[in-house]
Amino acid sequence: MKEHLYDKQLNIKTGGDQMAPTKSFHYHRYEPTPYHALENLYDQYKLKSSDQVVDFGCGKGRLLFYTHYLFHPTVIGVEMNEELYQEAVANQERYLQKAKLRTDKIQFYCCLAEEYSIDPLDNHFYFFNPFTIQIFMKIVNNILVSAEKSPREIDLVLYYPSENYIYYLENHTPFELLEEIILHNLFKHNSNERFLIYRLRKN
């Protein structure tokens, strides 16, 4: 019920069936982050309006609209599926119309995640298991290259984190675990129901 109410409040449509983006096994099916999970995340993890949030495999844009609604940062969605991308753009029009906003702080790109060019201001990256570890490694490398060119503090936010992602970050990158946010009503039944936040500190 809460899913529908939040969508109605934001004037967007982000529900629907899970969708397979392509025939490639590297990319996982679309599934939006539940609103109750986002509530838990943002009860403890706060953003600033100066932040820039990138959601890889953003689908219809739920995370981005909810995040923008709460904190007004710049939010960027990267989605390889043309149909989902078009739905995200339609949601953007509805969201801005209801909020009576004119802003360039909401952007969507239809491309492969590893082909997205990391902006020097991008400092928060969100992952809900959108692809295999091979793609994740390429993207993290892109982020690290960007951080070398434009030193800054960077956070990776992982929901329902895969063991492969965790192992790679903790053993092969300078990212350090900053915080674990557990969804208490679900975690006792499924230990994946949590957020892990990894931080790259500015040198």
Image (tube, rainbow, N blue to C red):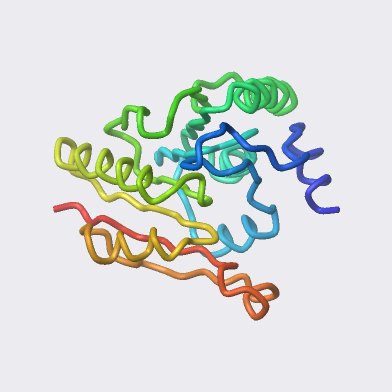
Q: Is residue 11 left or right of residue 155?
A: right
Q: How many marks on residues?
A: 0
Residue at the image point whose x is 51% and y is 32% from the top: 77
Q: Is residue 133 above or below residue 37?
A: above
Please provide percent x and percent y for residue 83: 65, 23
Q: Residue furthest right?
A: 1
Residue 6 picture quarter: top right
Q: Is residue 103 left or right of residue 111?
A: right
Please provide percent x and percent y for residue 158: 47, 56
Residue at the image point whose x is 28% and y is 41% from the top: 143
Residue 53 picture quarter: top left
Q: Residue furthest bottom?
A: 188
Residue at the image point whose x is 50% and y is 21% from the top: 104
Q: Is residue 5 above or below residue 84?
A: below
- Residue 61 vs residue 45, the one in the foreground: 61
Please provide percent x and percent y for residue 187: 62, 75
Please provide percent x and percent y for residue 102: 59, 19
Q: Is residue 29 above or below residue 110?
A: below
- Residue 65 vs residue 31, the one in the foreground: 31
Residue at the image point whose x is 53% and y is 58% from the top: 159
